[in-house]
Amino acid sequence: MYPVQLANRYLTSRIIPLIAVAAVALCVALVVIVVSVMSGFLDMLRASGRTLMGDVVISYPIRGIPWYEQLIDTIEKLPEAQAATPLIDTYGLVRMPYPDGSEKEVVTANVWGIEPQSFNRVTDFSKALYWKPPASPEAAASMSPDDLRLKLSDKILNDGLNLVKSDTGEPGLVLGMHVSIANERMRNGSYRPRYPQWFMPKQSVTLTLVPISAKGTIAEPRERVFPVVNEFKSGVYQIDKNRVMISLDEAQKLLRMDAGTLYDMQAPPNADGSLPVLGTSPAKVSKILVRAKPGVTPDQLQTAVFAAYEKFAYDVAADPSKVIKAPRVDSMNILTWEQHLRDLIAPVEKEREMMRILFSIVYLVCAGLVLSIFWAIVQEKTRDVGILRSVGASRFGILWIFLQYGLVIGAIGGLCGVGLGWLVIHNINFIHETIGQDAPAWSYIASFIIAAISFAMSVRGMTTGVVLSTLLWSVLGFTLALVGVGLMLHRGTLIWDPSVYYFATIPDQVDWFTAIITWCGAVIFSVLGASIPAAKAADIHPVRALRYE
Amino acid sequence: MSKFLLEAKELRKTYHLGRVKVPVLRGASFTLEQGEWVAILGSSGSGKSTLLHLLGLLDECDVDSGGVWFDGKPVADLKFSARNAYRNQSVGFVFQFYHLLPELSVLENALLPNMVNAGMNWFSKRAQAQQHATELLDAFGLSHRLTHRPAELSGGERQRVAIARALANQPRVLLADEPTGNLDTKTGGEILDLIAAKHRKGLSIAMVTHDPAVAARADRVVKLVDGCVAQ
Ligand SMILES: Nc1ncnc2c1ncn2[C@@H]1O[C@H](COP(=O)(O)OP(=O)(O)O)[C@@H](O)[C@H]1O
Ligand SMILES: [Mg+2]
């Protein structure tokens, strides 16, 4: 029983265990925060890749995939595939409605021609559309009262989903949230137009696309005015800054990828001078996005789609009514979204490797810190160990005392650390936003006042001759004065720059797996740190331990 | 069966400080009969503490030769747990510098050997042990100090607690290493009075001192000179 009672005494009769708990807590919190943010970031990238692209992408960029409707039918019959959608992925110029005057701003954009209904099935397009009424009363309640979306009706959402301006029946265009400069991001993550008249879904833009012939030459550019019907926010900054969407038909027309009659150039002309007709030239798309059924991995789907494409190419080849044949399967790019977004993901993977190494270092440093804290505390108890041994305590009894000591501090400190980490991560965007602003005047005035009081207290300590209070109060005073100056000079800096980190918000979910592992690590290193020097002290002869200075 | 309660035969011990050998005991023999109070007198550094530590099994370093017998049995044969039990119950050790646990109260320090002895049965043995310790501390004039920490006591008071601790399991031998060495003459005298009172009740005592006046309180005085005991 005495090990329990002594451990209890050592834990409760001094301030050092509290300091050890705080140190363990800080180490654990550090690891939990860093790992959670980093792995949250990777998860976000993973999730967004899927919602943006589906799971597997078939692409044949310049000349396009012919007979794609038939291919989509074949794919959608696959047991692995949930849905598939055709897509044109190209580049173009967007002439903005601003500034006032005749010289309007022109931006380059990644233009996606989509078939809205099937696109929505593959990628959750409706969730990405930003201008829509709140989905539920709860969602409405969480918005700020002046949020523009509270005044919107379902019409704007449907216009966006159909890519049509329902008032006039004109084909519409959806902008990425950051393509125009019109939207201002609010502190709570919502958007509003910088000026009321800049509400983009009331504006029109002019889109210019450059068709490229099968030979790779550039044909006459075509342009068209589109009313903006909505805007979308994928959460990936690079995409929200660059991408606009129009309907597939419009994109095909502008790029001359729509269906047409195919004439025989080699044969002699008909009697009326026209060329003999060979058949139809089918409409084409540059990509097909496929979404996997739940539980099917992108890799499994990729294999299935590969086979489906082979069957499709064979069917087309065997069909005499189809003059234009499908490209062979080995000239197609059939990639999972991860392979397709290699350029985006590769640097992140590298970063993750870097982070792994850094984490290991952070982890080791924290482990070493915890270890040495306990080492110092227990080493100091060597004389106590000698006393206990001289009254007959066994070596294991002594080990058991300090094992419990480390166990309790490690467990409690670890718990506090996980709690602290959770608190920080949960509010990380708020903290980040706060750092992003200039410090409010009251904060530095308050710290100057408290600093002044601390200095007064330290002067009092000096006059009464108390060294510790003089020291502590002056340290506090200097620190607060420095903090005050720092706050006064602080100009808002956003550490998490969305243009660098792809996402507009910092991941705010605790990685519980890491948290549990880290907690276990804290307990293990605390116990080790406490029991190794205790075992060492227990192993030497009692007199030697007693002589320990 | 030996007639001695505690006996050291021809103890030789050398400390090795790097290459330098410091011979401390060179064949020291010592005997203590049941109920006897023997003082070991010697100048500082003569090896008195070394001898007493070997008697109390506090220094398990192998001696070069010789050995210690307790109640006729060689202690060198004792296993680990038996050695702990020997330190816990057979002998009680009093140090010059008290060596109390700073985090424990006076009463808890005095109960420490009982707690160690009781192991998992502490709760059932507690009341009895506590009563014994309280009586002892009472007799030592510490009844008003039971909940105090050692740091709040004077040197004399601390040494009384240390003696109470040494006697907690009613050992047959008290080994005292300059118990008054750190105290003024008057306080030291009071401590010796306490020890003398226990001796009168039958406690065997081996006491180390460099002070002939202190040694004079014992039944018998032996001198430690040049690592050997001179009768
Ligand atoms: N652990 C040790 N290592 C080396 N030398 C020691 C050690 N302990 C004691 N000595 C030496 O042994 C000699 C006797 O010490 P000690 O028994 O403490 O003497 P006393 O108690 O008679 O003053 C001293 O010279 C001391 O320096
Ligand atoms: Mg000594």
Image (cartoon, coloured by chain):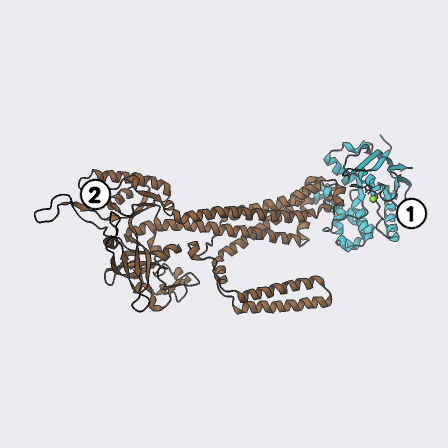
Chain colours: A brown, B cyan
Q: Residue furthest top?
A: B1
Q: Nearer the viewer, residue B49 or B78?
A: B49
Q: Secondary structure at mark 1?
A: helix
* Chain bearing mark 2: A
Query: In the rendered image, which residue does mark 1 sit on?
Result: B213
Q: Are marks 1 and 2 on the same chain?
A: no
Residue type marked 2: Ile
Q: Residue furthest left?
A: A271
In the image: residue B231, left or right of residue B136: right
Q: Nearer the viewer, residue A270 or A169?
A: A270
In the image: residue A45, left or right of residue A169: right
Query: In the rendered image, which residue does mark 2 sit on?
Result: A324
Residue plotted at (48% across, 46% down)? A353
Quarter of the image for the C terminus of chain B: give it.
top right
In the image: residue A351, left or right of residue B199: left
Residue plotted at (52% across, 66% down)? A439
Q: Nearer the viewer, residue B115 or A264?
A: A264
Q: Disc 1 beta carbon < 8 A from ligand 1? A: no
Pinpoint residue B126: horizontal percent, then vertical percent.
72, 46
Q: Residue furthest front?
A: A217
Number of other residues with Cα within 10 Å of mark 2, as a class: few under 14, some 14 to 19, many 20 or more: some
Number of other residues with Cα within 10 Å of mark 1, as a class: few under 14, some 14 to 19, many 20 or more: few
Pinpoint residue A219: horizontal percent, then vertical percent.
24, 53
Q: Nearer the viewer, residue A425 or A411?
A: A425
Q: Secondary structure at mark 2?
A: loop
